[in-house]
Amino acid sequence: MPKLAAFPKAFMQELCKEGTMKVSEWIELAVKLDISGLEWYAGFLEMEDESNWPKFRKEVESHGKTIPMLCCSPDFTHPEAAFREKEIEKQKRWIQMTHILGGSYCRVLSGQRRPELSIDEGVSLAASCIEACLPLAAEKGITLILENHYKDDFWEYPEFAQQMDVFCALVNKIDHPNFGVNYDPSNTFLAGEDPLELLYRVSDRVVTMHASDRYLISGTIEDLKNEEGGSVGYAKRLSHGEIGKGLNDYDAIFTELKRVGFDGWISIEDGVDGMEQLARSVSFLRKKIKKYWPDFQ
């Protein structure tokens, strides 16, 4: 049975760069939502102090919620082996962080799409780094989740595996019970591709999901494909919006996830226009999930 969580999409600069918002303030806002969990981000400034990890878990759980998944951004496609080894060590620390927070899912990425990198080389580098982290993940009972990502907020280049064919090649290269996909339909638009086509290709590997929505500021999807298809820089024709009012077809998405027996966490990346918007997105998703999973509470 799917469960709902929320991610502080609107407050990343405040929590991760400026320090003008405390994690406890985000917790107090999020626990008022009709959700079961809070997705965490490894880059919260206060997460640098490891003594805070169990404190935040206790704080969240005191409200009857959990921290099911950790969002982090390893860069596994760097040409230097020493750099990649440091990224593997970072990922292992994030696996430990997930475990201490009480979570079961820890995000991995491929890395940055550096201009000199070939597709085969990038897939090979990313796969070998992810595989180096899997023994610890298995030991801690954590599933590593590869997201079809666009670009980390603090990266120079977009995601190496942004394009569907590259993402699927990487997913297919890793066969391990502690590895799966975190599906984000909106990110597919940023690659100038169809989110349903991607879902149909990887649905049997999807274990978690980011729920978000995008809408066109101007023009058409064809304009987006012609102008933005995977280019450096955020797609200027697209903007984050309230879930259910954008381009994503959640009936088609949930029909496919239901078909393959999906029962993981759905974490909401929304609220860029305020907590009321996030609450409306929660309400929309609860109604949709109830339609496809009638026992959903």
Image (spheres, rainbow, N blue to C red):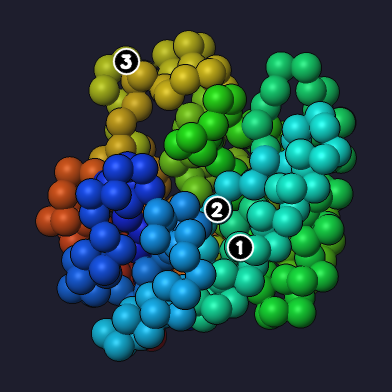
Q: In this view, does 87 lie above or below 39?
A: above
C-alpha separation, residue under disc 3 versus residue under disc 2: 33 Å
How many residues crowd mark 2 within 10 Å: few (<14), some (14–19), many (20+)? Answer: some
Residue on which disc 2 sits: 72
Amino acid under disc 3: Gly
Horizontal and vertical percent position of residue 187: 49, 39
Q: In this view, does 248 lie above or below 262?
A: above
User: What kind of element bears circle 2?
Assistant: loop
C-alpha separation, residue under disc 2 versus residue under disc 1: 7 Å
How many residues crowd mark 3 within 10 Å: few (<14), some (14–19), many (20+)? Answer: few
Nearest to the observer: residue 36 or residue 106: 106
Please state which of the two labelled residues, at mark 3 or mark 1, is closer to the viewer: 1
User: What kind of element bears circle 1?
Assistant: helix
Amino acid under disc 1: Trp
Q: Is residue 138 above or below residue 130?
A: below
Horizontal and vertical percent position of residue 19: 29, 49
Residue for point 24% across, 44% down? 272
User: What kind of element bears circle 3?
Assistant: loop
Residue 99 lies in quadrant: bottom right
Q: Identify the mark nearer the N-term, 3 or 1.
A: 1
Residue on which disc 3 sits: 219
Horizontal and vertical percent position of residue 136: 77, 71
Q: Are marks 2 and 1 in contact (CB under 8 Å)?
A: yes
Residue for point 30% across, 31% down? 239
Does residue 53 show up? yes
C-alpha separation, residue under disc 3 versus residue under disc 1: 40 Å
Q: Identify the mark nearer the N-term, 2 or 1.
A: 2
Residue for point 55% across, 25% down? 156
Residue for point 34% across, 20% down? 237
How many residues crowd mark 1 within 10 Å: few (<14), some (14–19), many (20+)? Answer: many
Give the numbered dot on residue 94.
Answer: 1
Does residue 222 show up? no
